[in-house]
Amino acid sequence: MALSAGAIWSFGAIIARLADRSDAFQYLIWRSIGIIVVVEAMALAQQRPHRTREAFTGGRRMMAANLMLLLASIGFVYAVKATTAANAAFLGSTTPLFGVIVARVVLHERLNRRTGMAIALAFVGLLIMVASDLEVGDLVGDLSALAAAVGFACYTAIVRSDPHRDWAPVMPGYAVLMILICGVVTVANGNPLLLPVRDTSLSLMHGGVIIVGGTLLYNAASKTVPAAAMTVFAQTEMVLVPVWAFLVLAERPAGATVVGGSIIMLAVVGKAILDARSPVEQPLVTGVTAPGAPAA
């Protein structure tokens, strides 16, 4: 489910690039509306309470999750709009590094050899790609992608801290905050809130289908997969973004991009296979593990 969530999310970057008559803030407003509409429709069909209300009445941890996913979403979409889709994906791939740090500090999750080797191998691939492509990106876009990586790592740790809780309200929660922030920025910049029909349709589909579908899978996976490993598995998003960018946008990746992306995919898939064959392994880092949190 974690691997599939990343694969589903990977289409979002291309959809955002195709909506080329709106800036990142205008786009995020309508993407957020799509999220709220679909999540609330699902709650209505299931005869459950309003999810948006739960997002702001669920306590400090729920609010923290709202804020971290807000940071991740704004950062990545802005990066995709400001630089190439592939470059934003490369820098977004630093999520596992931050994920390990956050999981270790906050959740006291232990790091085993497989996770450590997968992260090390993934970062070899990342360095290969960044070394050849970093200069094409806008500095603000690059920093936004890194901020997105930090936000998503923190969100993963929060969700993992209570794997039995229903975290679905986070989606409309951060979407409401997104609408408020991006609405103020859009009006302040003198830009219209209404978009062309094509951009509106793309942004609504991105939010209601790509974000909601991928996040539901990711939250479900977090019930059994430790936070550090989750961030590794979700890198299928960053690996596939350059592929879709080549096929749909004709953004031809450099040779180093292909090599680095292949290395990251090897790390992600290799860890998944090894975990399936041998789920128990001694940790590299020892420490007190949070209740219900197995080794990564």
Image (cartoon, rainbow, N blue to C red):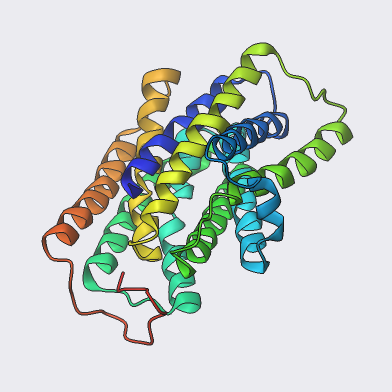
Residue 183: image x %, image y %? 80, 36
Observer-nearest of 125 and 34: 34
User: Most extreme residue toward the top, as rendered?
Assistant: 197
Observer-nearest of 247 and 231: 231
User: Most extreme residue toward the front, as rendered?
Assistant: 47
The residue shown at (74%, 39%) is: 179
- Counting labels gives 0
Snapshot quadrant of residue 25: top right
The residue shown at (33%, 52%) is: 233
Snapshot quadrant of residue 132: top left
The residue shown at (41%, 59%) is: 96
The residue shown at (38%, 82%) is: 289
The image shows residue 228, relative to residue 29, as above or below, that is below
Going by the image, does 84 lie left or right of 170? left
Q: Does residue 211 appear in this view?
A: yes
Residue 136: image x %, image y %? 52, 36
Residue 188: image x %, image y %? 88, 35
Residue 290: image x %, image y %? 42, 79
Observer-nearest of 244 and 182: 182
Q: Quadrant of the C terminus?
A: bottom left
Q: Does residue 252 appear in this view?
A: no
